[in-house]
Each structure stands twice: as C-alpha cells, then as structure tokens.
Amino acid sequence: MKSHVSARFAPALVALAFAATLAGCAPDGPAPYTPPPPPPPPPITLAPSLIQEASAWRGYMARANAISPAFKSGDDIQVSLRTAAAYEPKQFLRGAVAWAAIVALQDPTFVAELRKVAADPAQRIAMRDQLISNPNMATILPGAESAAGLILQALGAEGQRMVVNGRAVKQAAYDVQHSAWSKASVTDRDGRLIAAKSLSATPMMGDAADVMLMQQASTGPMAATPLGLTAVSAPPPWSPLVVRGLTLAALAAIGEAGDANLAAITTLSAEPNAAYCLNMAKLNLYQCLAVSKPHYEDIFCMGQHILIDTGACVVKWSGATMPPEPIRPVVAPAPARRTTAAARSPKKPAVRR
C-alpha cells in the first residue's frame, strides 16, 4: 500500500520540489512593481446631436436641390416654396459645420496623426483645450490640407448645385408667364408669408437611414459605409467655416467631441459672417413675399432669395467659386428693311439700241 501511495503522488511531489528550488534561486525581497498598461485612447467621438444636425442639413439640401422649375399650377409653387423655406438659420449653420467635420474625418492622415495624440491623456486634454480656445490651431495639424480639401469639395458642390437650381427656378418665373394661371393672384398671401416665417423657426430632423450613415461615417476613414469622397489637397488660407469643421473633426478624432464637451464645442458654429448671410437671405425672402401678388412672382422670390442666396452662402463658406452664369441664346434682330425711293420703285428694263 505504501508503494502504491508513493507512486500515486510522485508527480505532485516532483512539482513541489521544483517550485521550492525556483523559490530558493529567487532574489530576496518583494517582486519588482510592474505598472499597469495605460488605458486605451477614447474612440473617435462626435455627439449624437451633431450627427443628427449634419443629417438634417444634408436632407434639406437634397430636398431644395430637387425642386423642379417645371411648375404647372399655383399649388405646385406653394408646395415647393414651403420645402425651400423650411430651414432655421442657426441650425442650418450648425449642421453645415457638423457635416464638414464628418467629411474631414474621412481623411486617413489627418485622423491617424490625431489618434497618436489621443493615446496620451495629458496631450489629449491639452490639445482639446487649445482647439476650443483657438480653432485656428487646426490649420497647422498634419493632414489639414487634404482634410480641408475634402470639406471644400463636399460643401462647395452642395452650394453650387443649389445656386444652379435656383437660377433655373428664377428663370421659370419669366418662362411661366405665357400661362394664364401664373398671372392670377396668390390666395391667402398673408398666410403663406406667416407659414414661411414659421418654417424658418422650426428645427429640421434628419432621416433615420441617413442619421445611421452619418453615425458610421463619423467613426473615421475606416467606416463601414464610406462617403466615397476623393481627397484633393487645398492649401490655406481657408474660410472660417472650413476651419471650424476641421477643428470639430480634430476634437472628434481625439475622442473629445462627445456630449461631455457639447456646450464648449457648440460655440464653433457661431460664425458671425455666415449667420449674417443666412439671415439676410431670409429677410429678403420675407420682403419679397410681402409684396408678391401673382404666382410667377412667388417663383422669383423662391428662386432668388432662398435657393440662389442660400446656395451662395454655402459656396462662400466653403471657399469654392460661384458657378458661371448660363449663356442664354441671343436672338439677332431682323435686318432693317430699305425704304429709299430706289428700293420702292421697280427697276426699269435696259433700252436696246
């Protein structure tokens, strides 16, 4: 029995003896302290409310750019007028800045360099505070030129498209006058002016599917659903709105553009010149509608003071150029008819000799 027990526990005794040998070889004193690994950097973060506003801005631009100049009735005009007037200037500006930030986050170099900063808590907090207090700091970040190029491309294209569509709608105000219905007076003129002012004070909402797309795109250049933008480097100087979009993107890339910092980063969209541009477009719209009577004049108000003026604001914000005016065919006047006596008198036949 004794030999049986010894054989049974022999492996365990060997293991204990080996452990004791190792312990005897270990140096005296406690084991050296190994610090825990640093915490991982926070993920790329953009506050959900800003993603919602970026989507709302995109949705409005899509609806406005889809307005057709082929109006068939006064009701057609009023439906399009309500669609075009439905943006609140402050939210429109916040949405444009948020969209610019999401666009800049598609630049791999810009994001990769900022993720290095995000890994160090002290550097991350220092950069956050500097960007919020001085947005122009974003202009010297690595990759800023290509990220700014993306913003210029995306914002500029949207604004140019709106200007071109606005010109077509404005031209329809003249073309439609061959139809008798276009010269009839607008019914409830005061009501449609009140409706335009009310829509201008009502916040927009983003489409659920587009909000999800913006959420995915805001996670950076490796997003599951990329935006398909082509990077084009744009050297400085950049417009204030492009700089603010870059700044918000930089804060998001280091994980500091979430709800915890929302109050501070919301001030990035407070750009006075951009706000003035939108407010003037709205004021001119109200004044135009106040004196407009026939239907074709409402078309003019919509084409000029909503689509063209607002689109021009976006083009200016991006630093892009206004699209060229369309070349309209010039009809040459008919040649003047000769009225001299020689022209009126029939030519006499030659006399034969």
Image (spheres, rainbow, N blue to C red):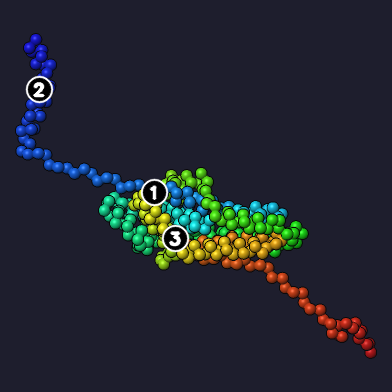
The amino acid type, in three-letter code, at marker 3 is Ala
For label 1, the residue is: 259
Residue at 21% x, 43% y is 36
Residue at 7% x, 36% y is 26
For label 3, the residue is: 270
Element under disc 1: helix
Badge number at residue 96? none
The C terminus lies in quadrant: bottom right
Q: CA distance from mark 2 to mark 1?
A: 60 Å
Element under disc 3: loop
Give the quarter of the image for residue 164.
Answer: bottom right
Which tag is nearer the camera, tag 2 or tag 1? 1
Element under disc 2: helix
Q: Is residue 70 left or right of residue 26?
A: right
Q: Earlier in the sequence, mark 1 or mark 3?
A: 1
For label 2, the residue is: 13
Q: Earlier in the sequence, mark 2 or mark 3?
A: 2
Residue at 49% x, 62% y is 275
Q: Are marks 2 and 3 in contact (CB under 8 Å)?
A: no
Q: Check disc 1: other Cα within 10 Å, few if <14, some if 14-19, many if 20+.
A: some
> Relative to the observer, which residue lies in front, 225 or 306?
306
Which tag is nearer the camera, tag 2 or tag 3? 3
Q: Earlier in the sequence, mark 2 or mark 1?
A: 2
